[in-house]
Amino acid sequence: MVTRTEKRLLRPDFAAPSITSSLLADFRLVGASLTRFTLRARKGFAMSGMPYMFIVAEGHCRVGLPDGRTIKLEPGDAVMALGGAPTQLAVGGRVSSYADMGEVWDANAGPPTSLEGYERPVDIAWGDGPVGCVLIGSAMTLSHRAGTPPVQKTLPAVLLARDSETRLRFWTAALVQMLDAESAKPSDGFAAISTMTSQFLMAQILRTHLAANAPALSDILDKGRSRALASLMRRLQRHPENAWTLADMAKAAGMSRTAFAEVFARATGTTPFRYLTGCRMNAAADLLRNTDLPITDVADRCGYRSERAFRDAFVQAHNMRPLAFRKAQRAKDDAIARV
């Protein structure tokens, strides 16, 4: 029989997430299509229109960026554009315009949010002759239920990540083997695997960028999140009657629930629900002092659907029942008026 002490020892001790982990939690994919591109001499393609990333699995290629620069990519190097900025990738030839490309991949027809039609790996091969480059690509659909993550606004239009920083070469080698096995023997569930794998690869690229730019990002994020929190706190004060959930508050602040809870606690020294309870108790005290509303109506206007739940919360906050509080406040106001 396991004792209570042993149960505590067996329970994992989860430390509070780091700032980087909280920022990464803001990014969620609802769809992604893993595609293997095999490019031969003087072949390439253009990409734009929706979030995407590419990682070099074999060989090398060149990427043409929106600012006109051309950069060589080696195995494990990655390029990602969460805003869908245009890029061109090619083996040989010039990387200067879509006209130089052998083919154009239309990203605007990217993964549907339903994930239907992506239950099998996609392989695209262009050109003849020896293979110049093999890329693992993913066109992605980002979740915007909590709004655009504040950190996304600080990212470059096209984010480049070197294998020396991300160590993605190891993962892409395993990914190529997985795609081979999946193509040889397809099985249901690949759409979900594709999305979760893309989520991991995206997080690894972002993680490297955040680590390299932590000092600069800190000020930007703190200012942006401070404004978002201030706006939310005003809404909680003005609308304590709403049936607020953690998801509602996080969405209003433009963050994931994990990031929101951590940022809120760090900024205010309390939890979101304790702060909300404080707003409700302040509103209740004001209504009891200045109106003759029945207790059930006061409870309803402060977000409580049960008079008993409201009474218990009020007693905990003010050390007296609502009616006793009203009588005490009225007596105090009368005494002041007689002076």
Image (tube, rainbow, N blue to C red):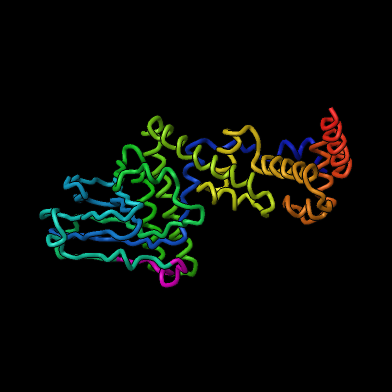
Regarding residue 59, the answer to whether it shows in the image is yes
Query: Residue 45's x, y, as percent?
Result: 21, 60
Which range is magenta?
Answer: 113-123
16 or 272, which is in the foreground?
272
The mark total stands at 0
The answer to whether residue 115 is magenta is yes
Magenta: predominant secondary structure element? loop
321 or 191, which is in the foreground?
321
- Looking at the image, residue 301 lies above or below residue 118: above
**Residue that extends furthest to the left in the rendered view of this protein:** 93
State the residue at coordinates (48%, 42%).
Answer: 23
Query: Residue 138's x, y, as percent?
Result: 35, 58
Quadrant where the image shows the N terminus: top right
Q: Is residue 283 left or right of residue 119?
A: right
Q: Is residue 211 left or right of residue 26?
A: left
State the residue at coordinates (28%, 55%).
Answer: 135
Q: Is residue 199 left or right of residue 272?
A: left
243 or 180, which is in the foreground?
243
Query: Residue 339's x, y, as percent?
Result: 84, 27
- Looking at the image, residue 134 lies above or below residue 270: below
